[in-house]
Amino acid sequence: MNLYEEFQWRGLLYDATDGLQEVLEKQTIAGYIGFDPTASSLHVGSLLPIMNLVRLQRYGHTAIALAGGGTGMIGDPSGRTLERQLLSIEQIAFNVEGIRAQLAHFLDFENGTNPALLLNNASWITPVSLIDFLRDIGKHFTVNYMLAKESIKNRYERGDGISFTEFSYMLLQSYDFLMLYDSHKCILQMGGSDQWGNIVAGTELIRKLRGARGYGLVSPLVMTSAGVKFGKTEAGAVWLDPNLTSPFRFYQFWFNTEDQDVVKYLKFFTLLSREEIAELETSLATAPEKREAQRRLAEEVTRMVHGETQLQRALLATKVLFGGEMDDLSARDVLDIFADVPSHDLLPTAFEDKGMELVDVIVACGIATGRGAARRLIESGGIYVNNRRVSDTQAVLLRTDLIEGHYLVLRKGSKNYHLARAL
């Protein structure tokens, strides 16, 4: 397959400008995708465009990741009903650096044949004067043309209104395409389907000012089978930064993918081959309870984003939820894994000297209503301390039994967890 056919098979081709298929079949090109620095980290919603750049490079083309240090000062109105809150120049610069570091995990910037490029459009947007921009760029766009674009028309027709600031975003994005064409002979811009109007406007600007042809390719916006925007969870966005979303929770996000979505996500977010995905699709149909497709999806994406070491820690943490050993877990791991279970605060001094009886800990954590009930639970083999069954009704817990001296995980039965904190 060539790149165009790869996009088709993976369901990544929502629309493309005429002639792109022939170009990708016959020549090596440069293509780009822009990333708005609205936060210091990208999130899983950014993974699809990132993977599109990865595929562009793997097929021998030059992949350009464009950080929007300039356009980020304006804000893209596409897909939004309200005006974006403007960020300070300092915050945008900080966010750009965070995005720069994350993109380096995916793209090969040292490749001797077709190294990827990471650019910041602030380098050509911030120096240009308003008068020069209006004379050289603005005169090539009519208001009627801009109002007809979906990103603007939707806001206008709903009566939400749009400021001149956001209205001008299309011109700035078109200017980006022109600058990349001039400096790197970039003839392809990719993005989500909501970017179609902006991308086509850029191809028109290249045609008018350079008498050359630019191309566009957009992928579908990712929705779950339930009709929810991909990456939106009750806990908020799922970030690529491990300090914002831990590798364990990142892994769990992918592992919890619904059966109806998992094959699509394997095509979108991994580099697995047709044959590998077909095998996983068969497994999903014949033995869905094994969740092999979800497990492979979670492993592939977590490894790609966080590396093998963090993937193994995420797998270890996942085993802990099903009764696995906890010896290698840190206090931070424990707090992350058991963030959603009932928790109880105990006095740190209770574990000093002679320690605290396990039956009293069980009662204090609300696992049993009294000491007699707590003893019966222990005798029946239903109590686990840090995932180890305790059968001694006279057991005493010392400070050394607590993880890093502060945390204790109690389990009643197979799944009823409680977290005790002695801080």
Image: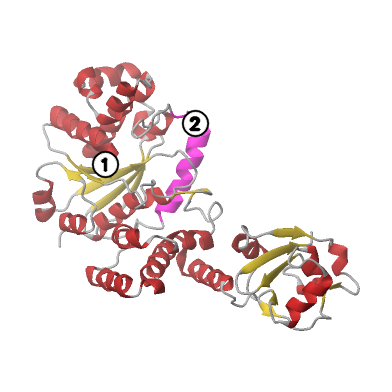
Instruction: Look at the picture and state if 153 lies above or below 323.
Output: above
Percent position of residue 352, x then y: 88, 69
Q: Quadrant of residue 386?
A: bottom right
Q: What separation in Å lies between label 1 and label 2 (alpha carbons)? A: 25 Å
Query: In the rendered image, which residue does mark 1 sit on?
Result: 193
Residue 87, disc: 2
For label 2, count other residues whose C-alpha is less than 10 Å away and answer few (under 14), some (14-19) or many (20+). Answer: some
Q: Type of residue at label 2?
A: Leu
Instruction: Look at the picture and state if 417 lies above or below 89.
Output: below
- The magenta region covers 84-104
Front-most of residues 281 and 61: 281
Dot 2 falls on a residue whose secondary structure is loop
Relative to 179, is 388 on the left or the right?
A: right
Q: Residue at x 78, y 73 (%)?
A: 374
Q: Residue at x 39, y 28 (%)?
A: 126
Percent position of residue 347, x then y: 84, 61
Q: Is residue 86 magenta?
A: yes
Q: Residue at x 40, y 74 (%)?
A: 290
